[in-house]
Image: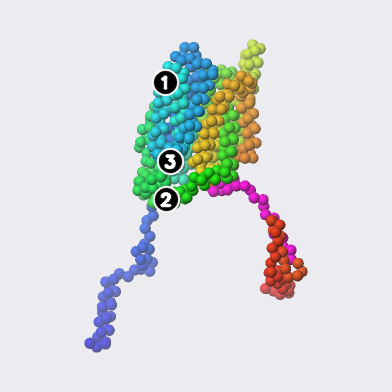
Amino acid sequence: MAISEMCSAENIMGSKLMLSVKMPNKDEPLLKEDTPEPSKQTKGSSLKQILVALSANWGTINTGLVFGYTAVSLPQLMMGGSRITIDRHQASWIASVSTIGTPCGCILASYFTDLLGRKKTLIALQLPAIVGWLMVGSATTVQWIYVGRFLVGLSSGMVGSPSRVYTSEVSQPHLRGMLSAFASVGTSLGVMLEYLFGSVLDWDTLALFNATMPAIALLLAFFIPESPSWLISSKNDENKCRASLRRVRDSKCDVDTEVNDLLMFSRADESTSFKEKVRLICRPTAYKPFVIVSIYFLLSQFSGLNVVTFYAVDVIRDSGSTIDKYVATVVLGIIRLVFTVLGCMMMWRLGRKPLSYISSVGCGISMLCFAGYMYQNVAWKAAGQPALATWFPIMSLFVFYACSTIGYLIVPWVMIGEVFPRQIRGMLGGVATCVGHFSIFIVLQTYPLLQELVGKSGTFAVYGAVSILSTIFFYYFCPETKNKTLQEIEESFCNKKKPKRPVVLNVNATATATVQCNNNKKFVFPDIVFNLPKRKTSVIV
């Protein structure tokens, strides 16, 4: 075959191949892997996350029921026609015995939350509440009321930690702040419901009604998925974790990225042993915020916050106001609910310290005004004169309750999840929660004692003075965590180092130079560093 024929044949074959193969355009990627795939959305279904958070936090309503029950039931139990009659000493124990069970519940919850899982713990903790309320409602002696109140307090202490932990683990960052406030809103809703139904129901019927709330929470807990974070950290089960995320997200949401992030954080937590956690507790980043949060709880409780909550009807009756005490109590419950929601919104805009100032100053002034009117009302009665401005004490209580709800009821509980180091946040958070509830027990037990020592008006004057003086503590020691990352908050509690003095260079006329440092040590540099020829001023570079 001639060379020219071969070339022509090759040209013909090449042209056919060029026609059969579709050449890519200039803008098309050459490799298939370079073709961009449609990315999945990062935000899941808000409705699913809200419903799951509501189901997990339904049990927090029981905490409000526990707080508000004594306000409406103790006046009935102390009446002569009651099925069970109690004295003032027994009334103080009925009010405070639940706060003994609450710290025990906090400790148990911190153990069972990691051992059994978030979902099973939320299911199990409802059982003591149901049994406790049934015991109170069917009690024939005051001892049965003690046991029932202890059980419902135990349940209310157990629900706080797993409900907040579960909500933060199943919600995404853009919803986490709002959904985490469901626990505080649930508590305030429980107080309002107790004041409302307690004004029309007897103390035993009210207790039986209260048993329905944890029963509903028990049913709702069966339908929520297990926490994806716990499935990774405790079970190391990626498939169940992915399935759990799909139930609380959306089919179009990218759950694989979240699973990978959970795996990474789980391995980081496993690297911290128990001995290392004990060492972390002894560091300033751990014990400083723990002391601050504990003192915050003590000061907020000694402002008289839960004294008004637990003894609302008695306080209103003794104030000298002519308004119906049960109607005023219902209004107090509504104020607590409204200002809890408002306080969560204000925290997002203002921060922690301003809300603490509002509570300390507002509660202090209003409580001193309330105490002053009570003192003057006693003087009017002794002189046989009619009371004037009977609206003033109830308005003082309303202002006091609004101010205390904005800061005292929200800020320390939010700080528990922010100021402690990540490796020991669960451990110190549980202990700090115990301190908070034990502070309630101390205040409720000392309330009758203070009344005997300084009188009723003097007791509330002490609460007002403590609240105003706590402003000094908030100004100097309360940290502001708004717009700060958890790492920045942790670093702010480290021991502050003294600023380094500027480096002074002493260059002598010879060929050596010394550097004077902040540790009073001198370093000698070779002469080639500082004995360079000087540049003439006439030389232009």
Q: Which residue is mark 3?
A: 114
In the rendered image, the residue lying farthest to the left is 1
Q: Quadrant of the N terminus?
A: bottom left
Q: Which residue is mark 1?
A: 137
Q: Which residue is mark 2?
A: 263
Q: Which residues are magenta?
A: 487-507
Q: CA distance from mark 3 to mark 2?
A: 17 Å
Q: Look at label 2 and name its amino acid.
A: Leu
Q: Look at label 1 and name its amino acid.
A: Gly
Q: Is residue 72 above or below residue 34?
A: above
Q: Is residue 489 magenta?
A: yes
Question: Does any portion of residue 385 appear in the rendered image?
Answer: no
The picture quadrant where one finds residue 220 is top left
Q: Is residue 413 above or below residue 235?
A: above
> What secondary structure is found at the residue carrying circle 1?
helix
**76 sits to left or right of 511:** left
Residue lying at 71% horizontally and 57% vertically, measured from the top left: 520
| Sequence order check, earlier mark of 1 and 2 | 1
The picture quadrant where one finds residue 473 is top right
Depth check: 236 or 316 in front?
236
Q: CA distance from mark 3 to mark 1?
A: 33 Å
> What secondary structure is found at the residue carrying circle 3?
helix
Residue lying at 63% horizontally and 48% vertically, measured from the top left: 496
What colour scheme does the image use?
A: rainbow
